[in-house]
Image (spheres, rainbow, N blue to C red):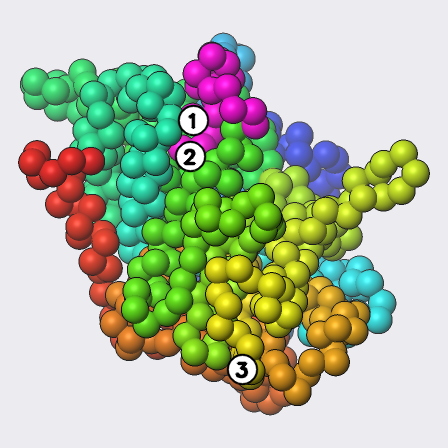
Amino acid sequence: MLEYKYLFPEFQGDKHGEILSLISGVDFEVAFPIIARLNFIVREGQIKNYVDEVVFWFGDKSPLVNQYLFRIEHGYGGDELAKLRLLNIWSNLTLLQYFLEVYGQSENNVERIIDVAGTHERLFKAYLFINEIYVANFNSQKVVQSVPKGVGVIMMMGLTMTAMLLPYHDLNHIDDGDAMITQFVKAVYFFQFAEANLPDVLAVFLGECGVGNWKEYFKAIFPVVDHAFKNNKDGLAYLTVDPNNPRAETSRLFLKRLAIDSHDSGFSQHDFILPRSKPLLQINSEKFVIVDNLLVYNKMYNSLFFEFNAIIKSNRALFTKGDFKGYLNDEFSESFLAKQVLNSIFAEGKYIRFSGDEIRREYAPDFIAEPDYYARNFDNIFLFELKDTFVSGLTKQSFNIERIIAELKSKLWYKETPKKDRIKEEPKAVRQLINNIKRAVFDELPFDKDLENKYLTFYPVLLFVDQGLSTPGINEIINHWFQQELLNDPGLLRLQDRIAIKPLTMIDVDTLIIFQDDFKSGKFQLDEFISKYWAYKEGFLALGKLGITQAVYDSTLTFGAFLRLFRKKRKTPAIFMEFGRLLFDKKRKS
């Protein structure tokens, strides 16, 4: 990775301060297009070497190209040159974060001296500094050395991959088309839920957007989404408001709401919080540029919690049911969203199926801590725990394995709470799945009493919403804890001749939305694909034919990535088309 210290070895000072100093002198109108194109260039992967990257940055006619190529060749040895690269997704996003920090200061009247002619070089130098930070953090040897001793090869690989990829995985390894489809589907489900359960909060949200209902909200945001999807071919997509259009003022207000401005907080926050919620930059009163396609698609659903939560914080009378995040986890994600998605996977008539909400309504309070979803086909039992949680920004960007383990453990294995004379352990997904396996084995499920005298095969699934949890390696960590729990349970060990328990598989809701038609039609069978998935991972772990780096990556492949290996071309799920028609069919109720 090209680093500043090899081109300018004489520098001694604060990298963070120097980055801000360099960016503070740039011309924003020149810098905006550069910043906006970087992620596109990396994701497309069309630039294959550092020479072409330098040419891309400065332009093939700039004298700076030869000057910097000379410095690079002087600063690095001959063998190193062939492997050198400039651009990477983490440095792109970090440059954007620094850029926004300076932008926020400038919009608040912090005086700057603008260097129009030197903007490209200032950004380039800042990028080289950021690459230094990247190399220091993404040191695989350093990460491996920090793995706790004695955890085993698989756990070591899981921890290493997680620490290396977690900081940016959810903003890089995501298919644009899939993201656009799934964000829309989840957003429609959310608005349907909000219309029935949060009408007052929804009304304030829609009023702030300048629209009368959530269908109009989608009609307002879809031109932005469509523009990003169809017209952002070179990584640079502008949106211009036509002042002669009768809806010009409405369009301008809506776009401004999606654009970062000086009144926003979070310019210097971790995990790129601000561009996640506001994916546009405003060039002038009529012109906007898209920061990143994926951020535009994510805007449809991912930011809704934060926007609704902000409304509630400013007017507590709108929501009186306690913790809003906890309420949404229980009532929307686990009860509503999980049921909608999983009912489309497990066709009625082929499976005995119950959502957690259905079990609660029928059997509580005598039966508690129910699975979030249960499905059985003859002897195959699918147990689901859904977790709408995420790894915090500080932890994601920490590259600290101990910190990552602690947060994943408290959110997905068990949470320790100090009490007066003891430590209370609250079971999370891993232990919740174990507990419900035991209930099924000992015929303690009141909603399914036909389990006696069967050789049962269990498919435990941790279903999740946030794409950060799809980082390669996390499933290995969680399954390691799951296997520990199994080995430490004498009751289950004694019954090995009567049951089979598959490894714990983590599956994201988005993958099930994309492939729901294949599962519903029977083309895909979830039990078969889970078995193939673990066989594939174990095979690559054992063989490693493509080299150790590829073997490690393939052995930590996520279920969603594995399923996409079988997709010859994208098929738009029927639910997307159904929801699309819903927006424009005036006769159909929302």
The C terminus - image quarter: top left
In this view, 136 is above or below 206: below
On the picture, is 359 further left or further right than 441?
A: left
Q: CA distance from mark 1 to mark 3?
A: 49 Å
Res. 333 in view: no
Residue at x 39%, y 47% (from the top left corner)? 337
Residue indicated by mark 3: 454
Tell me the quarter of the picture where residue 210 sits: top left
Q: Crowdedness of circle 2 by 10 Å Cα count: few (<14), some, many (20+)?
A: some
Q: Which mark is residue 102?
A: none
Residue 426: image location, x then y, percent: 72, 47
Q: Judge by depth and name the residue closer to the eye, 271 or 419.
A: 419
For badge 2, the amino acid type reads Ser
* Residue 307, numbered circle: 1
Residue topped by disc 2 = 303
Numbered range of the magenta stretch: 304-323
Query: How would you rate the neighbour count of disc 1 (Cα within 10 Å): few for under 14, some for 14-19, many for 20 or more?
Result: some
Element assignment for label 1: helix
Indicate yes or no whether the magenta region holds residue 313.
yes
Does residue 246 appear in this view?
yes
Q: Earlier in the sequence, mark 1 or mark 3?
A: 1
Q: Is residue 524 left or right of residue 2?
A: left
186 vs 307: above or below: below
Which image quadrant for residue 474? bottom right
Residue at image point 48% right, 51% down: 359
| Near-viewer residue (573 or 540) | 573
Give the amino acid type for the residue marked by disc 1 in the picture: Glu
- The residue that appears at 72% across and 71% down in the rendered structure is 486
C-beta proximity under 8 Å, tags 2 and 1: yes
> Is label 1 in contact with label 3 (beta carbons under 8 Å)?
no
